[in-house]
């Protein structure tokens, strides 16, 4: 089983959390997010970039009503420096974790991590309470590969939720949320176990998840469960977004 490299993982991000529209303008891959968040709205470079290329990307993004936003991946220090020189601010450094799905899979008690698609009303309510609204649910709806929403329970009550989708042999977990009153009770771990069980049942050998570096509890959880950091990125956002 070949471990996915960073390029493979970034392809899985696009497949499992897709923008409303892909726009290809050399040397850019632009994304129209329709309010679905930074990951589906950020531009990425597909080849080397010069200053005039940045200006053209800015024009394209403003034309679709988006503040210019770029994703900077490892190895793109030249682009990062060009954006910094234009006043772009770093936003939300992200770590990507990976493990073999079988390492995370575990037999679970019935109803501790319930799969469904489309998501149940209670799952949408849990997401909404955590700030994940209809625009991000629309991102999930757009996914064309196998997918599920998992409902975590604690003491016979809804306690957490996540979205999982496949890109070939890679399963990617998104939008993991646990209610404040049930944190540190094992709900998130059981949801991750359930996600790995489902991934294996669909033939996926790998589990991956993205988390902001500022989210210390989530980073600690993934490391505790044996997931390893394999890649990362951050955003550069136009100065107009911070004024």
Image (cartoon, grey):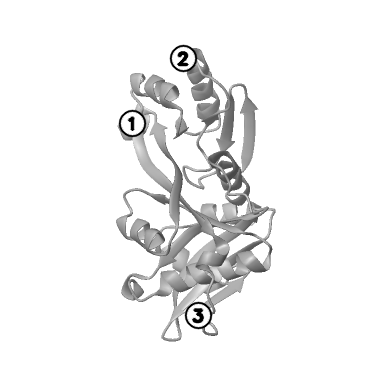
Vertical order, 185 against 26 (above or below):
below
Looking at the image, residue 220 sits to the left or right of residue 115; the answer is left
Tell me the residue at 32%/72% (across/down): 184
Quote the CA–CA distance across marks 3 and 2.
52 Å
- Tell me how far mark 1 sits from mark 2, CA to CA: 17 Å
User: Which of the 4 image quarters holds residue 130?
Assistant: bottom left
Please tell me how crowded label 2 is: few (under 14), some (14-19), or many (20+) other residues with Cα within 10 Å. few
Judging by the rendered image, the residue that carries numbered circle 2 is 51
- Would you say the residues marked 1 and 2 are in contact, meaning their CB atoms lie under 8 Å apart? no
Residue in view at x 34 percent, y 48 percent: 213
Q: Which residue is mark 3?
A: 112
Which residue in the structure is indicated by mark 1?
89
Mark 1 or mark 2: name the one nearer the start of the chain.
Answer: 2
Which label's residue is closer to the chain start, 3 or 2? 2
Q: Nearer the viewer, residue 128 or 54?
A: 54
Q: Specify the quadrant that holds the N terminus.
A: bottom right
Q: From the top left corner, tell me how far across and down residue 64 is, in percent.
A: 55, 32
Residue at the spot 44% in from the left edge and 23% down from the top edge: 79
Q: Nearer the viewer, mark 1 or mark 3?
A: 3
Query: Does 108 appear above or below 193?
Result: below
Q: Is residue 118 visible?
A: no
Q: Where's residue 151, x and y in %? A: 52, 73
Q: Secondary structure at mark 1?
A: strand
Give the CA distance from mark 1 to mark 3.
41 Å
Location of residue 149 in the rendering, given as x and y in whole percent from the top left corner? 57, 66
Front residue of 72 and 65 = 72
């Amino acid at each position: 089983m070949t471990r996915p490299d960073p390029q493979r993982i970034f392809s899985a991000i696009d497949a499992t959390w897709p923008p409303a529209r892909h726009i290809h303008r050399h040397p850019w891959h632009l994304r129209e997010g329709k309010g679905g968040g930074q990951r589906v709205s950020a531009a990425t470079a597909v080849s080397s970039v010069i200053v005039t290329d940045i200006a053209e990307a800015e024009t394209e993004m403003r034309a679709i009503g988006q503040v210019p936003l770029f994703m900077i991946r490892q190895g793109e220090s030249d682009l990062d420096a060009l954006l910094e020189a234009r006043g772009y601010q770093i936003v939300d450094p992200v770590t990507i974790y990976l493990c073999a799905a079988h390492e995370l899979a575990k037999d679970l008690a019935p109803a501790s991590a319930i799969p469904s698609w489309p998501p149940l009303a209670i799952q949408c309510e849990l997401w909404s309470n955590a700030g994940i609204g209809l625009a991000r649910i629309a991102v999930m709806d757009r996914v064309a590969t196998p997918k599920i929403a998992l409902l975590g329970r604690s003491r016979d009550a809804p306690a957490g939720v996540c979205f999982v989708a496949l890109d070939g042999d890679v399963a990617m977990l998104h939008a993991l949320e646990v209610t404040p009153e049930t944190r540190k009770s094992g709900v998130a771990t059981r949801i991750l176990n359930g996600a790995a069980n489902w991934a294996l049942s669909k033939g996926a050998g790998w589990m991956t998840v993205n988390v902001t570096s500022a989210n210390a509890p989530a980073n600690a959880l993934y490391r505790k469960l044996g997931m390893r950091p394999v890649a990362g990125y951050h955003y550069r956002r136009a100065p107009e977004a911070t004024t």
